[in-house]
Image (tube, rainbow, N blue to C red):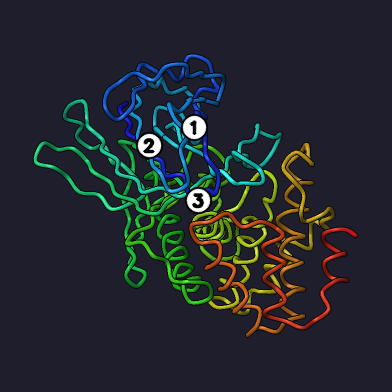
Amino acid sequence: MEQVATYVNSSSQDLAELLFVVESNRQPNVFRLTGLAWAGGQAVAGYALDGALLRVPLPASLRPGQAVTLSLSYELSLPAQASPFGYTPRQTNLGDWYPFVPPYTADRGWLIHEPGAIGEHLVYDVADYQVEIVLAGPMTGIEIAAGGVMSRTDHGVLCYQLPAARSFAWSASHEYRVLTEQAGATTVVAYVLPEHQVAGEAMLQAVASALAIYSERFVPYPYAGLTVVESEFPDGMEYHGLFFLGQEYLADYDGGPQGYLTAIAVHETAHQWWYGLTGNDQAIAPWLDEALATYSELLFYETAYPDLTDWWWSFRVRRFNPTGWVNSAITDHAGFRPYVDAVYLRGAMFLDGLRKAMGDERFFAFLQAHARQGELNQMTTADFFNLLPAHTEADLKPLISEYFGP
């Protein structure tokens, strides 16, 4: 792998070093750094790679607004596992496969976290991605799914461009069936395994419909494409311009929208706004993307299937009798159910209470303002609540105490 990274110091402080997150190096014998050089070709001295953290000392302090460029060479030996990063006989996935620079803030420094027992721990800055995939030889029948706009050179190199994005992921398989649907100016492409083509069509229609609904409710989706990939690993996983959806949801599809296939497909679609366009620290404040993505499911059903809103509340929330504080960090829970109940489900209940207190017009104006303020930035819980007074005079203290604690 050959990677060129140009970093611009957008903070208000001088930086003495750059930090790269190398998530693939958490597993033994997967990542091997073979070269690290400055833009002029001079080798970087004094760097240290320890687990998932690569520290690069800068030859001179990088002042605000200044840029630095590095070239990295490395080898990847993908693990044989069904996961966002790994391969099986049917599918190869590359999520969080490259070293990336995390966000830096004046008050907290580099936003880096260790994995928790549950949830997502990575925090992403915004970057312009230009990715070239060079095939080792003729590979007839291989389908490659990726975020961004693809073009092909005369020599068969696949070139992808994904501007102002938080991540770039891709997947490949000789078994994918490719389905497409148009949602306004956006082309939605689904890559599904052959036994789930009928369910894949239903998933595709739900995603295209959700794109249109969310573009109206929040802010317009700014990209020309969105890619959905059926995965052999369970549940869903979002990346910018692409998300994975577990094959168990497609296998369980019974022909209607009352089930996890539709609900989780539109949840992952909503992450293109809550995580993608509007950033947040997924380890410290996961509710800012997960609660909003969960509540976005309801907004989809309200518009596309208004007679199913009561079903959604029962199926997705009430039957679990959720407890816990919405503003939990991923380290506050040791298991899936308590984490989801607190952050996702109670988070959706809080947002519904907020909507009732504000009224629809002000509530959706607030969500739009939140999305715009978070675009290309990292929103915090404090940012969320500091923005509220401009959109409502309601006394929200009892509601906030009920869901976020005294």
**Nearer to us in this view, 142 or 251:** 142
Q: What residue would you read off at disc 1?
A: 18
The amino acid type, in three-letter code, at marker 2 is Val
184 to 289, vertically: above or below: below
**Nearer to us in this view, 109 or 266:** 109
The amino acid type, in three-letter code, at marker 3 is Leu
Residue 250: mark in rendering = 3
Of badges 2 and 3, the one in the foreground is: 2
Evaluate if marks 1 and 2 touch, with contact meaning CB atoms under 8 Å apart: yes
Place of residue 338 in the rendered image (x, y in percent of width and height, measured from the top left): 79, 46
Quadrant of residue 399 within the rendered picture: bottom right
Evaluate if marks 1 and 3 touch, with contact meaning CB atoms under 8 Å apart: no
Mark nearer the N terminus (2 vs 3): 2
Q: What residue would you read off at disc 2?
A: 68
Q: Is residue 254 visible?
A: no
Q: Residue at 81% of width from left, 56% of height from top? A: 322
Q: In what element is the residue under mark 3?
A: helix
**Spatial CA span between label 2 and label 3:** 45 Å
**Spatial CA span between label 1 and label 2:** 10 Å
Quadrant of residue 70 within the rendered picture: top left
